[in-house]
Image (spheres, rainbow, N blue to C red):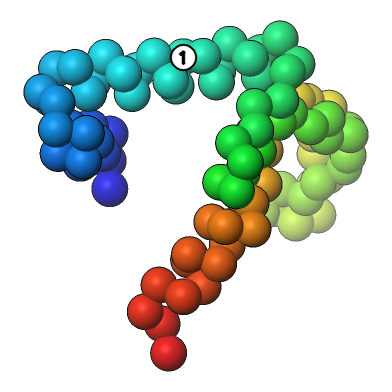
Amino acid sequence: MNKTEFVSRVAAEADISNGDAQKAVGAVLKVIEDALKSGEDVAFAGFGKFSVSERAARTGVNPQDPSKKVEIPARTVPRFTPGAVLKEAVASGGRK
């Protein structure tokens, strides 16, 4: 599902226009992005938690030439940890 499809489903679920749903989805994503940029976690009980994590610098291998080593710098990356309710919903989502 892409963003346009997601917005359409939100509009249908909330019984609002696509324009209003697009504004709402855009606002939610912006608030999460801004919080993560400032180092804050964003947690939704049962759904999950967005957070940032530090990756240490490391030495990797160039896949086109495995004999060459590549230095991969340290960086900050976003993380998502699913909550128990979301995990259960996905696990019971019809797979047998």
Front residue of 46/52: it is 46
Front residue of 75/38: it is 38
SS label for mark 1: helix
Residue 81 position within the rendered picture, expressed as x and y whole percent measured from the top left: 67, 47
Front residue of 79/82: it is 82
Residue 44 position within the rendered picture, expressed as x and y whole percent measured from the top left: 59, 36
Q: Quadrant of residue 7?
A: top left
Q: Which residue is mark 1?
A: 30
Residue projecting furthest to the bottom = 96
Residue projecting furthest to the left = 17
Front residue of 55/6: it is 6
Residue 21 position within the rendered picture, expressed as x and y whole percent measured from the top left: 22, 23
**Mark 1, residues whose alpha carbon is within 10 Å: few (<14), some, or many (≥20)?**
few
Residue at the spot 41% in from the left edge and 82% down from the top edge: 95
Please indicate, yes or no, whether residue 56 appears anywhere in the rendered image.
yes
Q: Quadrant of residue 9?
A: top left
Q: Left or right: 13 with respect to 53?
A: left
Residue at the spot 48% in from the left edge and 64% down from the top edge: 89
Tell me if residue 27 comes above or below residue 71 in the rendering.
above
Residue at the spot 60% in from the left edge and 48% down from the top edge: 46
Residue at the spot 14% in from the left edge and 32% down from the top edge: 15
Disc 1 marks a residue whose amino acid type is Lys
Q: Left or right: 90 with respect to 73?
A: left
